[in-house]
């Protein structure tokens, strides 16, 4: 074993535990990011489902005038917008311009999609779809808002439809990994790292002693 520690190439293999530990730390960090992404996707899908259900209800009675849906659409969209850090808004066309018809509840993250050219270009070119808009509210951190929109009712002419928009950002995620789980993971890796470094230093020292003694592991005078 001591001879192995002084081999020109093989001696570096004692660093493998530390390398593996560092790779584990990077993997854990990536894993946390993936979990947060999955939770964000869950919230976004929740917003999509809300809009799709609303659209299905609006489309159910094709004999009903489009204006008769307005109050129900407003109530449903305002419910979405009141969810923590979720976005919801409904518009209707007035003289070719989109007019907001719902009350906004944006105490923490004000957002106006009409301020973004890519949003206007997208919604006027499709009946439904999604896009991601990055923005930074005043005195708040930058965020990427995942947006889903749909025009309704589709049985009405284009100038007699409502545009419903809903979305979520990473700040809407309230379910997180418990702090004690994350803390213990990093503490255990830190302790393991220190122990591995100490062990490597000890082995390196033993290897050096072995080399100085010319391969004799015993002190002079000992049998």
Image: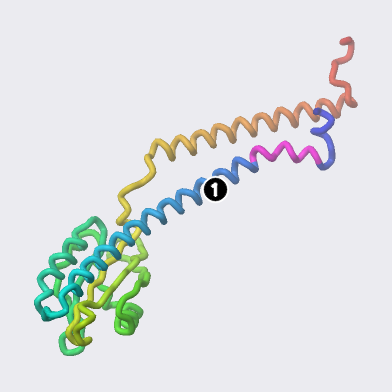
- Residue 117 visible within the image: no
Residue at 49%, 38% in the rendered image: 186
Image quarter where the C terminus lies is: top right
Q: Which quarter of the rendering shows the N terminus?
A: top right
Q: Percent x, y for residue 147?
A: 32, 69
Secondary structure mostly taken by the magenta-highlighted segment of the chain: helix
Q: Nearer the viewer, residue 13 or 67?
A: 67
Above or below, comparing residue 71 to residue 86 in the picture: below
Task: Give the residue drawn at x 54%, y 48%.
Answer: 27
Q: Residues within 10 Å of mark 1 (few under 14, many from 20)?
A: few
Residue at 35 percent across and 63 percent down: it is 143
- Residue at which label 1 appears: 27
* Chain part drawn in magenta: 10-18
Please tell me whether residue 179 is drawn above or below residue 27 in the rendered image. Answer: above
Q: Nearer the viewer, residue 161 or 189?
A: 161
Q: Is residue 209 visible?
A: yes
Residue 15 included in the magenta stretch of the image: yes
Residue ID at (88%, 21%):
216
């Amino acid at each position: 074993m001591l001879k192995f520690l002084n081999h020109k190439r093989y001696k570096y293999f004692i660093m493998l535990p530390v390398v593996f530990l560092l790779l584990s730390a990077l993997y854990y960090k990536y894993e946390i990011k993936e979990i947060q992404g999955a939770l964000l996707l869950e919230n976004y899908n929740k917003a999509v489902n809300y809009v799709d259900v609303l659209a299905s209800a609006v489309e159910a009675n094709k004999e009903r005038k489009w204006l008769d849906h307005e109050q129900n659409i407003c109530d449903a969209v305002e419910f979405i917008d009141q969810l923590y850090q979720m976005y919801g808004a409904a518009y209707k066309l007035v003289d070719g311009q989109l007019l907001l018809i719902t009350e906004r509840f944006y105490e923490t993250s004000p957002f106006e999609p009409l301020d973004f050219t890519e949003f206007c270009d997208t919604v006027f070119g499709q009946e439904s779809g999604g896009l991601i808009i990055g923005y930074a509210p005043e005195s708040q951190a930058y965020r990427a808002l995942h947006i889903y929109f749909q025009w309704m009712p589709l049985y009405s002419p284009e100038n007699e439809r409502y545009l419903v928009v809903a979305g979520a950002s990473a700040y809407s995620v309230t379910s997180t990994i418990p702090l004690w789980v994350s803390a213990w993971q990093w503490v255990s890796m830190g302790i393991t790292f220190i122990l591995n470094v100490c062990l490597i230093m000890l082995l390196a020292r033993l290897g050096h002693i072995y080399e100085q003694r010319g391969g004799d592991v015993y002190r002079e005078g000992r049998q």
